[in-house]
Image: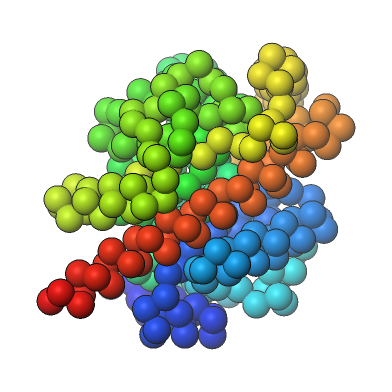
Amino acid sequence: MGINYLVFSEEVRKAKDQGQPIVALESTIISHGMPYPENVKTAKIVEEIIRDSGAVPATIAIIEGRIKIGLTNEELEFIATSNRVLKASRRDLPVVIAKGLCASTTVSATMIAAHLAGIKVFVTGGIGGVHKGGPQTFDISADLQELAKTSVAVVCAGAKAILDLPLTLEYLETYGVPVLGFRTEEFPAFYTRESGLKVDYVLADEVEAARVIKTKWDLGLTGGIVIANPIPKEYALDKNYISKVIEEALVEAERLAIKGKGLTPFLLEKVAEITGGKSLRANIELVKNNASVGAKIAVELNKLYSSCKEKI
């Protein structure tokens, strides 16, 4: 169901036909998360990292009402530069597709598209969550509900540091979403390795990660898994420093009455401006690191499923 709306790139189609591991990538980080040309350059580097790690990348976006699973270089440029590109979450998908519009996909929309395409592992920078002041504003990312519903493993550097991380973890716990640390006991906070918060369990390596993912779905426990992978130490920002920067950005957002879909892109851009580009550099490096880990997990997961088929 929904498969008629999908268009696979030649590379991804071939990978599916040959039973190769595939890793989904979102496109909002390209259209709304980074400036041009860093967005295109990063997207291409991330795809190459996934290929070098033994998997096939599938960057996802909606172009002229079609869900593209894997983008050409021309489509990547379009998503990165066009002012026609909307930002699509779960609620936007039916409208954007029915109207034949163009949109990048957020974490939630990418999870939906990946699941429709039969892709089990998705790499992103950081998931959305409960925004600061969430108990009063009810500003909660659709990503969290998607993780509760859609069976895709999400490799990320935790949740975006601009969020209320304790409430985000509480929300995920309520909906039974495992939050697993990849070789870490502490939940990473995007730009930093530390948040002062614990993950549910620690994964020793990609083999164990694949085993946990498959076991969850074998048990009929639908929904996603958060695999929290900290930013490499050499690129991490100081926790106190970035906390002050984020507070400054939040004050500016409140002054300008920026809310809803525009809030996260505004905050990320403002943080990059205040840090003189340090946060952008950190963002790029953590995504690259997630791509390496996610691809290795996809390879191991693919081995497990292939082994099951051989036994049958």
Question: Residue 98: x and y, percent?
Answer: 46, 70
- Give the image quarter of residue 200: top left
- Is residue 210 in sight in this rendering? yes
Residue 50 versus residue 75: which sits nearer the camera? Answer: 50
Q: Say which of 307 and 197 sits in front.
A: 307
Residue 144 appears in the rendering: no
Extreme residue toward the right, this view: 276
* Quarter of the C terminus within the rendering: bottom left
> Residue at left 33%, top 47%?
208
Give x and y (percent) for residue 195. 54, 20
* Placement of the N terminus among the 4 image quadrants: bottom left
Q: Position of residue 127 (x, y in %)?
A: 50, 40
Q: Which residue is drawn at the image coordinates 26% and 55% (left, top)?
A: 214
* Image coords of residue 32 (percent x, y): 68, 50
Identify the residue shown where x is 19% and y is 47%.
221
User: Image height check: is 108 above or below 173?
Assistant: below
- Give me the residue at 14% from left, 50% from top: 219
How many numbered marks have been drawn onto this rendered protein structure?
0
Decide which of 91, 201 is in the foreground and name it: 201
Give the colour scheme of this rendering: rainbow
Residue 203 position (above or below residue 111): above
Q: Quadrant of residue 100?
A: bottom right
Q: Is residue 205 left or right of residue 50?
A: left
